[in-house]
Image (cartoon, grey):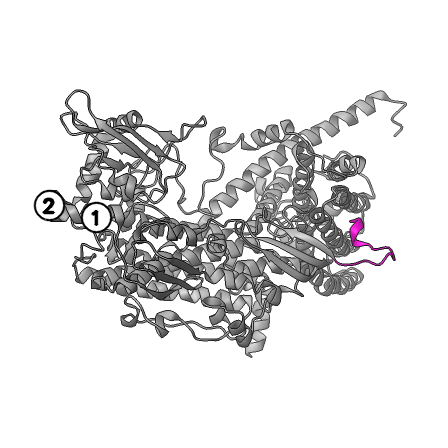
Amino acid sequence: MKRVTEYLKSLLLLELAAGLWVTLKYLFKPKYTLRFPMETIPRSVRFRGLHALRRYPNGEERCIACKLCEAVCPALAITIDSAPRASDGQRRTTRYDIDLFKCIYCGFCEESCPVDSIVLTDILEYHMERRGENVITKPQLLAMGDRFEKSIAANRAQDAAYR
Amino acid sequence: MADSIDQAGEIRSYTMNFGPQHPAAHGVLRLVMEMEGETIIRIDPHVGLLHRGTEKLAESKPFNHSIGYMDRLDYVSMMCNEHAYVRAIEQLVGVTPPERALWIRTLFDEVTRILNHLMWIGSNALDLGAMAVFLYAFREREELMDVYEAVSGTRMHATYYRPGGVYRDLPAKMIQYKESRWHKGKDLKRMNAWREGSMLDYLEAFARDFQHKVDEYEELLTDNRIWKQRTVDIGIVSPEQAYALGMTGPMLRGSGIEWDLRKKQPYAKYAEVDFDIPVGTHGDCYDRYLVRVNEMRQSGRIILQCVDWLKKNPGPVMIENYKVAPPKREDMKESMEALIHWFKLFTEGFSVPAGETYAAVEAPKGEFGCYMISDGANKPFRVHLRAPGFAHLSSINETTAGHMLPDVVAMIGTYDLVFGEVDR
Amino acid sequence: MSMSSDPMILLWTLAKILVIAVPLIIAVAMYVWWERKVIGWMHVRMGPNKIGPFGLLQAFADVTKLLIKEIIIPTNANRFLYFTAPLLAVIPALAVWAIIPFDNGAVLSNANAGVLFLLAMTSLGVYGIILAGWASNSRYALLGAMRSAAQMISYEICMGMALVCVLILAGSLNFTAIVEAQAGGKGLFDWFWLPLLPMFFVYYISGVAETNRLPFDVAEGESEIVAGFHVEYSGSAFALFFLAEYANMILLSFLAPILFLGGWLSPFQGWHLGWFSQPGWWWLFLKFFIFATSLIWLRATFPRYRYDQIMRLGWKVFIPISIAWIFVAGLFKYFNVVTIGH
């Protein structure tokens, strides 16, 4: 009897029909994909995207050129030169370059930074058009920080309990 | 074609180059095949096209700097690779992470296993022509990657496991979709239905629903006569052969050998969770397919148990040994000693007592091991990574010669090759 | 009809050819769009949705892209054959439309030997594929061509046998006559699918195999031999193969209703439901749409057969069934079991 039913099942292509039924059901279901440039998937507050250098609320840059990020960077993507600032003699970076091609976005730089200066923002859509643009410089990083300070601060505040 | 006919006019077998640019090559596999018509006489895998020297690179960096590179070995089972590396360090240093960290590791090892098996079922089915499974599997992958992102901040290369625990505790809030022109009101509510609570609530909802999703994949494939014709009796590996060829993971279990490091040499919290090891009987592609599908279901079970424990037991996720793990950020800002530890740890890492160790985890593809020698410095003297894919790929001539060209594709699918780990 | 003596007839025929060929090419473009859309929906995606409303202009954008792309000729390819092959594939695929009726009388050539012309033209298409595979000077292309040749020849037999069954019942090689033979008072139960049910399936599945569609697309076998016979083709030469394949799919979706499902006859014929019982071209196009969509559905769902398994299915399953059913059809005819026409 079992063999007969099995034979009939195979003759009637039942298992193929079951597969077709699955795809047919999905034809009418709401779609999972999003219209990407116009809407995006949710982004975590811990997201590790493009880098930025932050400032204190009074406009002073946070970075004190301790070079911890440079030391911890596994990909050796960060290059820092430092010198006393001309105006007040404080130790500051004269050069802060990040090579985005080398960076592996591990987040160690942000983790190590004692003054919360270098951060990884939640920006992941960026591109370069010319050779050399992959190295972002200090003014660019500070500009990034100025521009996105609000979201950077909000994300850090939300995750503060876990840091 | 001229070279396949010799002077006597006799037709010899011809060679065909499969990859490294080939839709079914899963990256950069290059096979040189000696063929007679569609039948394969001999098959010769060429590896090394994705060699990045990870092992050598690890020798040049303090121990904790190389975690990020472990993600990039088998880039579809990221945290499992980290786990092996981090465990090797912990064994040498002699620290044990807090219990909660071990549970989190168990949880994420299983999340990773599902991620990997989803990738496998999708690409194996796509290689054999079934496109639907691929996209359904990627939908679920997307959901699990949101979990990765929620805890670590990246969707793939997490750098989440650290010697002595994990990077940060699980977030209390799951990330949610935002309103847009196309998704608002009820629709948005449906999309965020699982995301209202914590990340653990989300994972629980996912794990419960996932069994139905696996049912769907099975409906599309398991009984399908075309799928069976393409996989049953293809690439049979006998138990003896499987041992001899150094196979591990589903490749070994598909041949009927019940060997799983999670049971045989439990690590993390595997001794405390309840799950079964699915085994095959015949050792063909179809059996390995069934084994992996079943493993996905078992992983769902383990996830539920981990979620249950983690919900009930809050606690630290990182040891308070400042030689290995950094102090809390707030402490660093307040205390001089913490600041010194902070600077010491992030500049020169930590020194590991001289010795050697081997730590292996049951990665989704098989036994992923890390053999580490320390000479007492802050950098490893030598790191060797035992990638399961490499052993599997080297058996391709034994398993596939005599089959036809489309079966090679089925075999590559069932090997579940990822060249990040094969070439290292 | 002597064409040279009457230029008006020649012009009229040319006009009719254009009236069929231009919408056909547009139909191919829209069919590609519909395929991508349906497959997308079945895969919980959205499909093309950026170019034009609902992505409707996507296919035209793709055509434009293909036409302005460079055609790369492989070294040591046989240039003459390399460029002849796409033409050989596309010409029969378009020529066969001469004998397809869209309604009673709406046909370019109401040839009495229509079925023979159909068989001849569909068999010619395989030469384009074989030549493309050989002329490309690539082993992947050659393998694709060999597979394609073997597959097409074996499934041509089943398809021919299925046609023979229809011929026996209808008693004519003329497509219009075949459709009219399915008229009657019992609605859709007067159509040939009922007495020829196994042949209907054999015809449909052979048709899928003949057009190289999943689950029988080993000639292209994207994940095995990359793109099979047209792996070395690019630009407009590739576009011609593409056009031929989709024109053949549309043809199959027209032929199955014409031969087995009453063409333009209403499924409620003879049931006196007013407009619903009237025959008309819209019925044919509705049936065509269902068949065309079903081809997409198959592609969205199934894995691909292996080449030797397809051969086994063709020779060991379909051909015996076909031969047996020709005998059965003969018995039907002899004992007048099936009513033919009104």
Q: CA distance from mark 2 to mark 1?
A: 12 Å
Q: Which residue is mark 2?
A: B336
* Identity, as a three-letter code, of the amino acid under mark 2: Met
Q: Quadrant of residue B386?
A: bottom left
Disc assigned to residue B344: 1
Secondary structure type for disc 1: helix
- Res. B208 visible in picture: no
In this view of the protein, can residue C90 be seen by the observer?
yes
Outermost residue to the left: B334
Of the pair C234 and B17, the residue shown nearer to us: B17
Q: Quadrant of the N terminus of chain C?
A: top right
Q: How far across and how far down the image is residue C301, in percent?
A: 53, 53
- Residue B105 is situated, as x and y percent measured from the top left of the image, at 29, 60
Decide which of tag 2 and tag 1 comes sooner along the chain.
2
Assess disc 2: are there few (<14), some (14-19) or many (≥20) residues with their C-alpha within 10 Å of its C-alpha: few
Residue C126's x, y, as percent?
76, 46
Q: Is the residue A10 above or below the residue B381 in the image? A: below
- Please say if B71 is above or below A7: above
Callout 2: residue from which chain? B
Residue under the point 68% across and 55% down: C200
User: Could you say whether the residue bearing mark 2 is in a helix, strand or loop?
Assistant: helix
Quarter-wise, where is residue A68 in the image?
A: top left
Instruction: Name the amino acid, label 1.
Output: Lys
Q: Tag count in the figure?
A: 2
Circles 2, 1 touching at the beta carbon (< 8 Å):
no
The answer to whether residue C230 is left or right of residue A131 is right
Q: Which residues are magenta?
A: B1-13
Residue B196 belongs to the span the image colors magenta: no
A156 relative position to C96: left or right: left
